[in-house]
Amino acid sequence: MQPAVAAQNATVAVLDSHRQVEESVRRLHQSGIDLSKLSVVAKDRRAEEQVVVHYGASGQARYWGEFGPFWTGMWASLSGWACLVIPGAGPILVAGPLGGWIVAALENQAVFGGLSALGAALYGLGIPKDAVLRWEAAVQMDKLLLIAHGAVDEVGKAREILA
């Protein structure tokens, strides 16, 4: 696990495993962090090697594949979700509001020239471009990003928990 790094109103932790993400989300929630202020981003692992399905059932997002319980749980817990195929990055899964921000970044692509849709959304949170590039590379290396955003005091509390 790499230490959490702060942006203006966001902090990002780079985690090695789905279990670390689950534990971190649980700790953040137990300390009073609003789950609607959290997002998780990861490459859809092994999507080229096996059948992977993203679907809706009974008003909930579901994932069928090796990490089904993880993604179905994240999508049920965090506010919003997205499954994207980004050129150069491949299939990316998002739980939390970052999914909507990525779509908004796609609509304003010219504003963030040179960044992918994921990078543009992170940059739009106030994250410096050099950190954005590092985190995009981390996702490509099968790391998971856990992002907390919000008021400065909330982000500071989340940063302490994730450190």
Image (cartoon, grey):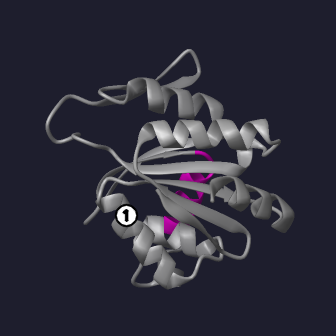
Residue drawn at (59%, 60%), measured in percent from left and top?
101
Overall secondary structure of the magenta stretch?
A: helix
**Viewer-nearest residue: 96 or 111:** 96
Left or right of 125 in this view: 18 = left
Residue 51 screen position, x and y as percent: 21, 28
Tell me the magenta residue range: 96-107
Residue drawn at (30%, 26%), measured in percent from left and top?
65
Residue drawn at (77%, 36%), measured in percent from left and top?
30
Residue 138's place in the image compared with 77, above or below, is below
**Viewer-nearest residue: 56 or 5:** 5
Left or right of 106 in this view: 9 = right
Q: Is residue 110 visible?
A: no
Q: Is residue 34 visible?
A: yes
Residue 36 screen position, x and y as percent: 72, 44
Q: Is residue 152 magenta?
A: no
Residue linked to disc 1: 138
Left or right of 82 in this view: 37 = right
Q: How many marks?
A: 1
- Residue 138 appears in which quarter of the rendering? bottom left
Q: Residue furthest left?
A: 49
Residue drawn at (80%, 42%), measured in percent from left and top?
31
Residue 32 screen position, x and y as percent: 83, 42
Callout 1: helix, strand or loop? Answer: helix
Q: Is residue 102 magenta?
A: yes
The amino acid marked with disc number 1 is Ala
